[in-house]
Amino acid sequence: MSVQSEYALEDALIKQLVGMEYARVDIEDEAAMLSNLKRQLEMHNKNITLTSSEFDRVLNHLNTGGVFDRAKVLRDKYALKRDNNEVVYLSFINSNEWCLNEFQVTNQITIQGSRKNRYDVTILINGLPLVQIELKRRGAELKVAFNQINRYQHDSYDAGYALFQYVQLFIISNGVNTKYFSNNKQQSFKQTFFWTGKDNTRLSDLHEFASDFLKPCHIAKMITHYMVLTEEQIIKVLRPYQFYAVEALVDKVKNSNDNAYIWHTTGSGKTLTSFKASQIIQTMAKVHKVMFVVDRKDLDYQTAREFNGFSKGSVDETSDTGTLVKQLADDSTKLILTTIQKLNNAIAKDRYLSKITHLQDKKFVFIFDECHRSQFGDTHKNIKEFFKNAQMFGFTGTPIFADNAQTQTTKDLFGECLHKYVIVDAIKDENVLRFAVEYVGRYKRKVSPNEIDIEVEGIDTKGLLDSPQRLEKIVDYILEHHKQKTKFPDFTGMFCVSSVETLIKYYETFKAKQEGKDNPLKIATIFSYAANEEDPGANGLTDGLIPEESVILETTKINTYSRDKLDGFINDYNNMFGTKYSTKDSQSYYNYYQDIAKRVRQGQVDILLVVNMFLTGFDSPRLNTLYVDKNLKFHGLIQAFSRTNRILNDKKSQGNIVCFRNLKEQTDEAIALFSNKNAKETVLLESYEEYVARFNETSEKLLELTPTVSSVDHLPDENAEAEFIKMFRELLRIKNVLTSFAEFKDEDLTINEQSFEDYKSKYLDIYDKVKKQDEGDTVSILDEVDFELDLIQRDEINVAYILNLLVSLNKLNPEEAKKRQKEIIDLIAGEVQLRSKRKLIEEFISENLPKLTPNGNVLKEFENYWNEHKTNAFDRLCKEENLSPQKFESIVQTYVFANRLPRQQEIVDSLNFQPKILERKTLLERITLKIEEFITTFIDGMGGSV
């Protein structure tokens, strides 16, 4: 049997299309196409009859600009001035009722340009050639057809009236494989897509593809609804999974009020999907507004840039909460992009509520970007309670499943998953690249001369990991291999490390190693520098979420060492690129952040050194290599790795991951979890009684091992300590669930609250021991035990809690007291609401506490100490800003009883003078900030202690 020829393939396709209600038309050349166009436009526009001169005016209008300009002409109506001076509006395509267009198919149209070209199969809609299909015989490479289209674009598409520049979609097929792509002169074969069913099953056979994708209603809908004309003058078409996701979201809004989420893997283009969904949903009559919500300022900026890149002015980015409130109240603003923090401020603070209360019953559709990060807390609850008629949709590449949930899953919060497109789908479709993961570095344990050296993988002690010798070897390795990894200068790299302290060492080592060398690698960095802000993910202790580093300048509790170092690094950057950034103010620091992002995308920075910044939500197709000296798992691992696997061109064949830690197990686990479409999504909560029984059963086992808190100190070996850690960790997990029940009572548990906290302290003692382990000694088996510090109830820790610890601290022997003091200081450092109080509390511990006798009244002494500092701060603020003490006191009391910050007029009324109009804005901003700082330090988070 002979192989099916290109001609036979073409003939079979045309017969199939005719059977799908395309009208077969014979068009040999441009003259025949123009004649057909006139008839089709007349039919499409209510059987209007156009005179020759009128049709000439239509052709002159159509023969305008290039491919991008014509795409806009296609979608607009044309005000035709008829011969009798009457004006009629001609439609070239019906976008609202996309099935009501005129569909034809023809083949072998010949156009004479710089060369004569004959095109295979053309689909005409209302007479315009909008879909061009190029076929190759079975067995031929598909890319041959792609290259042929590129030649046609160069040779003949602009000939005559250049009607073939109206082509929106190209389809290429060899019968077995079929792909589609948009008409874009910058197109790459990497930007050609297979069509699939809703379950991502590929429809690659031409007959299957045509029966689904080329149905008249579907192809018209793709052109009118699922293409995006960007500000960069590029026409983009949605990929199948993006299409199905948007269709599912639109259907949900039309036919229900149910919430839902979309699981599309990181790097698959969720921003374009969410933009298109927002764009369509905002036009629905029943929808008052669409709110696109992100959870960090850098993503706010980046997403707004991308949205407005798809369509200029399409989104109103909110610069502050006040602006957001104005946009919420403005009925003409249909699509708003904001951060979840600003949204929460708007609905939680009295000064904004009165302006938006009338919106509570309006139909709002919320779309949350990267919903795995931001939605597991009070904010989600606040939004649902305020917006009574809200419909919430989440987008995530890394959902929370039962396997890695603390309490709730993504499904618990958002309902069903409307569409899944996991990393294996994206790699199979070549919509993201594969990862090439290397594990570099093996460390030898020091032994006595009479023993044989043994190699130990995965040693994870801070002393070893941060040793200068190790860091130097890693820098040497990167300098030696970077150009090979990045195919220098085509691509760039990023290096993520465990802490700011380590980053500083790495940066200075890179600088020293390259001193005086010709054409050194361009190294840049950015990080936050809040005092003692340790990265809780540095040792893999979180559930995998990468902690946020603020791109808002820290103004209090600054680590001056880190800030001074960063200023020096920024100065290097300024010298490298002729810029003038610094950390002197928030705007300059944020502009520095934006400039780094731009230069990384443009390939001007060779290696970007980070702790957490840029590891999530940052897209740079030119970044192909990630160096990792940081423990990652679950979401954070996939998010970080996925910075490297964006499709760019044929030369970028994979994302390179170079791990200087043994992350193989974590990598395998994360990829398995987020590749499994059937991963368990629901945590089926059992009854309260069952969880109580499980807690008590586990606690009995714990008490068998360690009958008293002090017995933890006498566990015989590390195996016993590991057993204790595992059992107490299980108690943490169960109690974390138990406390979500309304009927929870501490009395139901066999371990009371105080004993539980004491055992928790021992749990943390062992954790600290592991952290401080010396690299020259033996490798602890406790390194392999997963400490779940994130399950410790941080929201319960306030000043009152700290004071209770101080009371017990004062009764311990000096050595034990010193150890506990370190724990308390570390605890304060880890609490956001205690950061403003940290200096004062530490000062009390170091200066006042030692003066007390063992039976001294710690609470009384602290109260006196605190009130003295509070009074001094109060008096200082009144004096600096010329405030009436009585009126300022009234402001403070209003906050205490109503939890409401002062309104601007209340601040004006509290002044001992009348501010000038021109000074008023700056003055009020400064005083408001100072009042908020006073309240944060001396009022919030006290827990009834003072």
Image: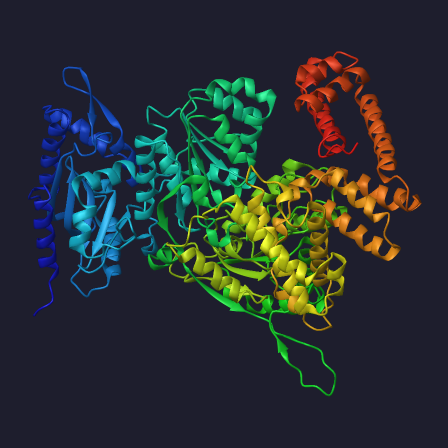
* Percent x, y of residue 18: 8, 45
The residue sitting at 48% across, 57% down in the picture is 644
- Work out whether residue 524 can be spotted: yes
State the image coordinates of residue 722 (x, y, percent, origin top left): 65, 65
Residue 555 falls in which quadrant of the image? top right
Of residues 7 and 907, the one drawn nearer to the viewer in this rendering: 907
115 vs 314, left or right, is left
User: Is residue 523 visible in this depiction of the protein?
Assistant: no
Residue at the image position 56 percent from the left and 35 percent from the top: 378
Left or right of residue 726: residue 816: right
Where is the N terminus found, in terms of image quarters?
Answer: bottom left
> Which color scheme did the rendering employ for the protein?
rainbow
Estimate the x, y position of residue 881 in percent, counting from the top left: 79, 21
- The image position of residue 754, as x and y in percent, is 72, 46
Along the viewing direction, whichever of 865 and 642 lies nearer the viewer: 865
**50 lies above or below 737:** above
Where, by quadrant of the figure, is residue 160 drawn? Answer: top left
| Quarter of the rendering containing residue 468 | bottom right
Q: Furthest residue to the bottom? A: 450
Q: As displayed, is residue 142 above or below residue 393?
A: below
Q: Quadrant of the C terminus?
A: top right
